[in-house]
Image (cartoon, helix red, strand yellow):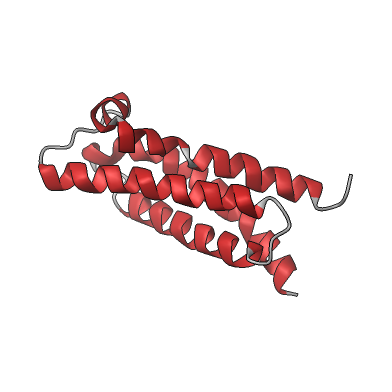
Amino acid sequence: MTSSAPRSRLLFWTGLATMLPGLQFVFPVATLGALGIEVGDAAGMFYARHWGLMAVCVGALLMVASRPVGARGAIVLAATVEKLGLVLLVALAWNEPALRGLRGAAVFDALCVLLYVPLLWRWAR
């Protein structure tokens, strides 16, 4: 097993987990309802579905980055920025009752950021 195997598994499994919100692209009402989130208008539903699709794209890219590819660093950097953005948005609205369902995603994304930053640092050297 090469030294990059744990990093590859990390990117693969966190990518797969990142794709889970993709269910809200296909089943937005059921998925959001399971999280205790209600969307009251068409614009909110549009953005909820779009976020689900974006999560699938970012997760799929992380899974691609689990293999040796030239764009690995760029993919992980983009995913880190996206995840950090969600963490900050949820943290700033932590007490907002309508966003309680996003706390789990924010915690997961915070852990991913903590795991990805050392990888990015190592690859940049």
Instruction: Give me the residue at 32% from left, 54% from top.
Output: 92
Residue projecting furthest to the left: 41
Can residue 95 be seen here?
no
- Is residue 26 in view from this perspective? yes
Callout count: 0
Q: Position of residue 115 (x, y in %)?
A: 64, 52
Q: Is residue 87 above or below residue 124?
A: above
Residue drawn at point x = 42 percent, y = 47 percent: 55
- Relative to 12, is 110 on the left or the right? left
Which residue is pictured at 48% across the width and 40% down the height?
19
98 or 56: nearer the eye? Answer: 56
Q: Along the line of sight, which residue is nearer the eye, 46 or 38?
A: 46
* Left or right: where 59 falls relative to 6: left
Residue drawn 29% across and 29% down? 27
The quadrant in which the N terminus is found is top right
Is 97 rendered above or below residue 83?
Answer: above
Residue at the far bottom: name it: 125
- Residue 112 point in image, percent of width and height: 57, 49
Q: Is residue 86 left or right of residue 58?
A: left
The C terminus - image quarter: bottom right
Measuring from the top left, give residue 109's x and y in whole percent. Answer: 50, 47
Tell me where residue 116 appears, x and y as whole percent: 62, 56
